[in-house]
Image: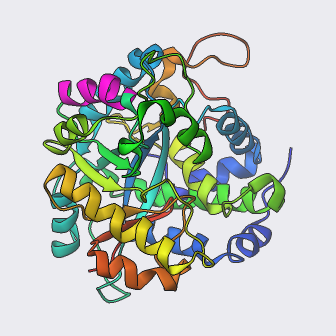
Amino acid sequence: MENFKMEEFLQTISKDKRCLEMFRYLINSSYIRVVNYHNTNPVNAERFEAEIKYYSEHFVPVTLKDLDQFFETRKWPYEKPGLIPAIFEGFRNHYDVMLPILDKYHFTGWFYFPSFFMDIPLEEQLPFSEAHELNITDESLYPDKRIAMNWDEVREIASRHEVCCHTGNHFQITKETPDEDMYREIVTAKRHLEEKIGREVEVFCWLYGEEYNYNKKAHKYLKEAGYKYVVSNLKMEKIR
Amino acid sequence: MKNIQDMFKEIDSQGMEPYKALMKYCDSRVTADEGIPAVIGLDDLTASWNTTYKGAGQDEEFRFLMAAGAMVFASLYEQKSAEELGEYPGIAPAMSAMAEMFFHAGEDGRIVPYREVVKQFVVNQDGQEGGKPDGEL
C-alpha cells in the first residue's frame, strides 16, 4: 500500500496554479457540475434517459439567466445544486436521441455548435467531420449521410435550450492562429449562428480547454463578437 | 456526512489505492459515447478577485470534500508524464475523476459516485453489472 505523504501532496498541487484556482472555486462555492456528451447514438438511449432522469431528481437545470443571477447576487438561487448536460458538436443524433429525453424531463441542455458544420453539403459531412475531429462513432446511423443537425433542428433546440458557439469549423485556436482565422472562428461563427437561430449567442467554448487568459490575442475578437461567457474544460468565465 | 478529516484518515489507512482504481476506471470510459461528469469553476472576470459566493444548500458541506478530493486526484495526475496526460493539465482529468467519486451528497448523507447514476449500464472488472466503483471510499 502506498502511503499518503502530505508534504509531497502539497508540493505537487502547488506546481500548477490552476490546481489552486480550482481549489478556490470549490471552497468559494463558485462552480457548477457538468456532464459532457458527444455522440448520443440510439443504442445508448436507455442509458442517457437514466442519466437525465437522475439529474432531474437530484439537481436543478441551469439556464443562462440562472448564471446571470448567480453572478449578480453571488448566491445560487436554488436549494439543489445545478447541473449542465453539455452536448458537443451539433450531431444529428443529439436532436433525434437526446433532445426528446431532455424535453421529457424538462431539463435544460447546453448545445455547443461548430456553427459552419450545419452548412456542409450531405456528401461532404463525413469527410468534414473526419478532417475536423468531429468524432462520429456510428457512421452507418444515417444512410442519407446527414450527420449534422439541419438549421430547423437547431432552431427548435434554441427555442427551449441553451445554444453556444464552439468555433465555426471545430477549429483549435492557438496563440499562433492568424488574425483572419481567429476572426472567422470567433466572430463570424457567432454571427452566423445568431442569424440562423434568430437570437443572441452569449457563450463561446474553446476546443481543448483553453482558458480566457491563455490567449490574449483572442480577447479583442471575443469582445468584438460580444460574448458574455467563455467556457473551457476547467471554468466558465464571465467576460462582460 | 463524512468530512475532510475522515477522508484523510481513510487515505492514511487505505492508501491511495481507491483513488488510483477510480483513475483507471476513468481511463476506461468511452468519452465519445458516454456522459463524462466534471466540475468547472465559475469566474466573474468583471468582478473583484476576492468576490465570495454562496452555493446550493445541499453542497454547503460537500464542497469541502470535493475540494480535497480534487486535490488528491490532482496530485496523482500531476505525477503522470506529459505524454500520458496529453494536451490537458493534470487538474483537468482530476476534476472529472473527482466528479466521478464525489458526484453529489445523497439525502442519507452518503457520497454518491457518478457510477451509481449509470450502474445498470456499467460492467465491472469481474464482468458483472453494477454501480459500486472499485475506488469507492
Q: Is residue A117 visible?
A: yes
For the view shown, which residue lies furthest in the bottom direction?
B48
| Residue drawn 46% across the image and 60% down it | B64
Percent of width and height locating residue B81: 84, 59
Q: Is residue A106 above or below residue A79?
A: above
Residue A33 is left or right of residue A106, and the answer is right
| Residue drawn 19% across the image and 45% down it | A158
Q: Nearer the viewer, residue B57 or A223?
A: A223
Percent of width and height locating residue A13: 68, 70
- The colour scheme of the drawn protein is rainbow
Q: Nearer the viewer, residue B37 or A119?
A: A119
Specify the quadrant of the image occupied by residue A25.
bottom left
For the view shown, which residue lies furthest in the top direction?
B128
Q: Is residue B113 visible?
A: no
Percent of width and height locating residue B128: 65, 10
| Residue drawn 29% across the image and 71% down it | A227
Taken as a whole, is the magenta stretch helix, strand or loop?
helix
Residue A70 is left or right of residue A46, and the answer is left
Q: Nearer the viewer, residue A221 or B58?
A: A221
Percent of width and height locating residue A16: 67, 75
Specify the quadrant of the image occupied by residue B86.
bottom right
Q: Which residues are magenta?
A: A93-104
Quarter of the figure with the C terminus of chain A: bottom left
